[in-house]
Amino acid sequence: MNVNTEFFNIIRNRSLTAMSCFWLNADYVKCVHASGEHFSGYNAVIQSWQLAFNWEQGVDFQVRDVRARVLTDMAWVTMKTFVDMDSGPFNMTNIFEFHHGRWYLVHHHSSVMLLADADMEHQIVHG
């Protein structure tokens, strides 16, 4: 699904303007980042991406095992995202709605990725 590829290109380019246009401007949109933080409503979701783009360094990741289901006005995509092939994937789900001739993201959910360290576990925050 090309719209899902566009989502990852926006993240790679760290474009808040593009991300703002990509999400449906609605109170019911939701975003769960890999940090485990949950954001509801358009303004909160976009602010979360602003923080992510400002805080995170550029991320080189690979998306694999992409599965899409498309209905008339709704679609969902599941995938595995690898930041480091040795640490394994974290899972993502994106849900889109079709409005006014185009697809908009309405829900993004990323699993929390934990890496074991000799002393403690560290969370990696992406997406």
Image (cartoon, rainbow, N blue to C red):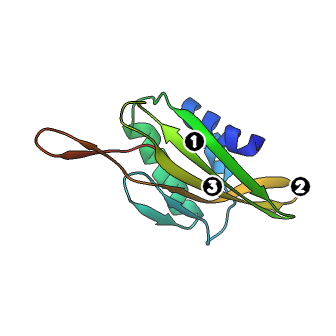
Residue drawn 63% across and 49% down?
20
Secondary structure beneath dot 1 equals: helix
- The quadrant holding residue 75 is bottom right
Q: Which residue is mark 1?
A: 16
**Location of residue 34 in the rendering, given as x and y in whole percent from the top left corner:** 42, 51
What residue is at 44 percent from the left and 33 percent from the top?
A: 83
Identify residue type, mark 1. Leu
Badge 3 density bin: few <14, some 14–19, many ≥20, Cα 10 Å: some
Task: Specify which label sits upstream in the sequence, 1 or 2.
Answer: 1
Q: Is residue 127 visible?
A: no
Q: Is residue 101 above or below residue 86?
A: below
Nearer the camera: disc 3 or disc 1 = 3
Q: In the image, which disc is placed on residue 94?
A: 3
Label 1, residues with CA under 10 Å away: few <14, some 14-19, many ≥20: some
Which residue is located at x 55 percent, y 61 percent?
Answer: 43
**How far apart in space, not on screen, are marks 3 and 2 (Cα)?**
19 Å
The residue that label 2 is drawn on is 101
In the image shown, does 121 or 105 lie closer to the viewer? 121
Tag nearer the camera, 1 or 2: 2
CA separation in Å, label 3 and label 1: 18 Å
**What amino acid type should be assigned to the residue bearing mark 3?**
Asn
Q: Tell me the kind of residue under disc 2.
A: Gly
Residue at 43%, 30% in the rendered image: 85
| Foreground disc of the pair 3, 2 | 3
Which quarter of the figure has residue 41? bottom right
